[in-house]
Amino acid sequence: MGGSAVRAAIVALALIVGVPGGPAWVAESHARPGALRPVHTYSIVARDPDTGEMGVAVQSHWFSVGSLIPWAEAGVGAVATQSFVDVRYGASGLDLMRAGWSAEQTLRALTEADPHAEIRQVAMIDAKGTVAVHTGGRCIQYAGHELAEDFAVQANLMLNDGVWPAMAAAFRTATGTLAQRMLQALEAAQRAGGDLRGRQSAAILVVRARATGRAWEDRVVDLHVEDHPQPLGELRRLLTLHEAYQHMNRGDLAMEANDVEAALREYAAAQILVPENLEMRFWHGVSLVNAHRVEDALPIFAAIFEADENWRSLVPRLAAAGLLPGDPAVIDRIVSVGRR
């Protein structure tokens, strides 16, 4: 075990036993359960066995649920902490798993150290796919969980006791990326009845199987719906938009590598997902011009300018910045397209 892992283990042990100098696990909000936030909700923690990606997806009738419940770190694990939330299950759970503890060891240690474990609901999954779940005996009816290989679903204060089984069944048969499959599980929960109080916010967090050392690249998906009458519908819209922008990013990288055909395929895939997005269409047109395919680009620009004239004024600015050819004839053809 390296030095950083040793330090993490020491900190985690200090947290669990409450030794001087360690985090005050017992002394602070655990001693005041009435001060804790009652974020009753349903969620899923999961790992994709093919990619190794791990994540959490959640919906609740509570503002900004994504700032409290989902925790995940590439190469370490993922945590959902809910019911009467103590966010230290997330932070300290990741500390312990980073130090080499399994999800089962981590959750057992933290619940045993928590004098109010009976009001918590927590699920964890580690980078090896080990899953652990705790539903305290005083979580509000209907509350329960289902644990399976590479995932766990959990819910409390539900309209009925069929919510979490519906989530598990949906996830087992879902297709697509890990984020898409977790969202399908949330949607199944809502169809089964969902939260007794209704719905307000939702979130999806997915991290890579292994840390790159660049935290901004390790989060594959990090989407929050803070307050919305249909949070899952909005979350699906955001996830689709996120996937479209990922295609755009891959297209840009392909252009940097002078692989024009690959870039154009990626841009086209993005536009299929969000055909109404003018910006994606505009940069697709720019890439075609830079690939000496002006004739193919002109209809794209014409449709964009018809929808919003402001984009027309951007064309000469890009040429001045070296992002379009400096040939005045080419720029004039683009700027003039669609004018009556």
Image: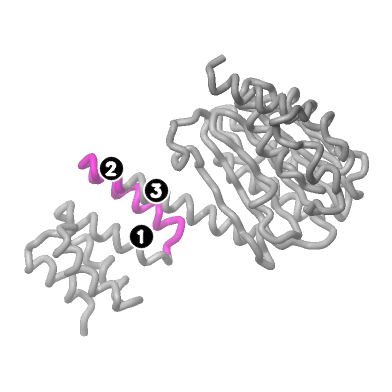
Magenta segment includes 265: yes
Q: Are discs 3 and 2 less than 8 Å apart at CB?
A: no
User: As rendered, which of 336 and 235 lies closer to the eye?
Assistant: 235
Locate residue 176 relative to residue 166 in the image: left or right.
left
Which secondary structure class fits the magenta region best?
helix
User: As rendered, which of 65 and 238 lies closer to the eye?
Assistant: 65
Locate residue 74 relative to residue 337 in the image: left or right.
right
Residue 247: give its label: 3
Give the crowd class for mark 1: few <14, some 14-19, many >=20 residues within 10 Å: many
Residue at point 62% right, 23% down?
99
- The percent coordinates of residue 193 (x first, y second) are 82, 56
Locate residue 22 relative to residue 75 in the image: left or right.
right
**Would you name the residue on which mark 1 appears?**
280
User: As rendered, which of 213 and 158 lies closer to the eye?
Assistant: 213
Residue 254: give its label: 2
- The percent coordinates of residue 179 (x first, y second) are 58, 44
Residue at point 60% right, 40% down?
175
Say which element carries label 1: helix
For badge 3, the amino acid type reads His
Say which element carries label 3: helix
Q: Which residues are magenta?
A: 252-275
- The percent coordinates of residue 37 (x first, y second) are 78, 53
What is the quadrant of residue 50 in the picture? Answer: top right
Please tell me whether residue 197 is drawn above or below residue 128 in the rendered image: below
For badge 1, the amino acid type reads Met
For badge 2, the amino acid type reads Ala
Q: CA distance from mark 3 to mark 1?
A: 10 Å
